[in-house]
Image (tube, helix red, strand yellow):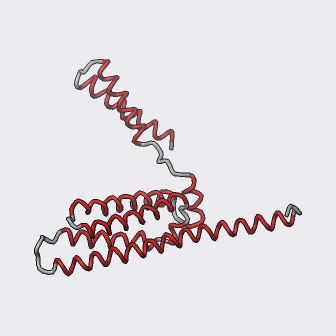
Amino acid sequence: MKTLRWFISAAISSGIFSVLFVVVDAGTLISALLGGAAFAGGALLFAPEKIDPSFAAAAKDIGIDPKQIKGIISGGKKKIKLMKGFIDKIDDAEINTGIVKVAGTAENIFRNFQKDPKDIKAARQFITYYMDAVINVLQQYSAIPEGAAGRKDFRKKVIELLNTANTSFEKQLARLYEDDYLNLASEMSVLEKTLKSEGMM
């Protein structure tokens, strides 16, 4: 794969140099400089994607490709950014407070995913459904003009949804932390048994 990367980069560089030097008659120096730049650009473009080692380890446990884990986390961060973007679009302090709370809890969940990717399997519904549902409702509300019929009733539903969503997100986060605590307790129990069996306790 690495050899192919350099071969493609060299081919691009050679092609650029030939076109500039022979066809355009740009001169040796300019042709060589731009050909070299094309080689460097090709090397960067075809460089293998870096994957966090913890993602590779987690992938074996949960049966998800490491690149997919990376995509889930980066996609979640984009959704959080999109969610926060509605703060500038919606001129309503109560709704904006709700958005800040939901986005903040979601950020904590994705920090947990970054630290412990195995938790992704337990929280897949959160990733695939709940965040999209919140974003979809905020999009609908932001598109309703001020003073439009039904806007006040919809506003109440949005506030209720944000409160419910944040409560659900917090419960999800607590479960993920609890899972971490259970894993730690299990590890400590094994360590304790090992120490006792070795006569160290």
* Image quarter in which the C terminus is found: bottom right
Q: Quadrant of residue 98?
A: bottom left
Residue sitting at 36 percent across and 69 percent down?
Answer: 131
Q: Is residue 147 left or right of residue 46?
A: left
Q: Is residue 64 left or right of residue 24?
A: right
Q: Give the camera-side residue of 98 and 42.
A: 98
Residue 135: percent from the left, percent from the top?
A: 30, 68
- Furthest residue toward front: 93
Give the total number of marks visible in the rendering.
0
Query: At x 62% / y 68%, what residue is drawn?
Result: 181
Residue 159 coordinates in the image, percent (x, y): 29, 75
Would residue 129 be seen by someone viewing this image from the given angle? Answer: no
Q: Residue furthest right?
A: 199
| Outermost residue toward the top in this view | 28
Residue 189 versus residue 45 in the image, above or below:
below
- Residue 173, compared with residue 12, is above or below; it is below
- Residue at position x 81%, y 64% in the image: 194
In the image, residue 52 lies at what x, y percent?
Answer: 53, 51
* 93 and 107: which is toward the camera: 93
Q: Is residue 156 visible?
A: yes
Quadrant for residue 127, please give it: bottom left
Please name the residue shown 45% across and 42% down the image. 47
- Between 77 and 180, the residue placed more toward the observer is 180
- Name which quarter of the figure residue 21 lies in: top left
Answer left or right for 189 relative to 86: right
Q: Position of residue 101 (x, y in %)?
A: 37, 66
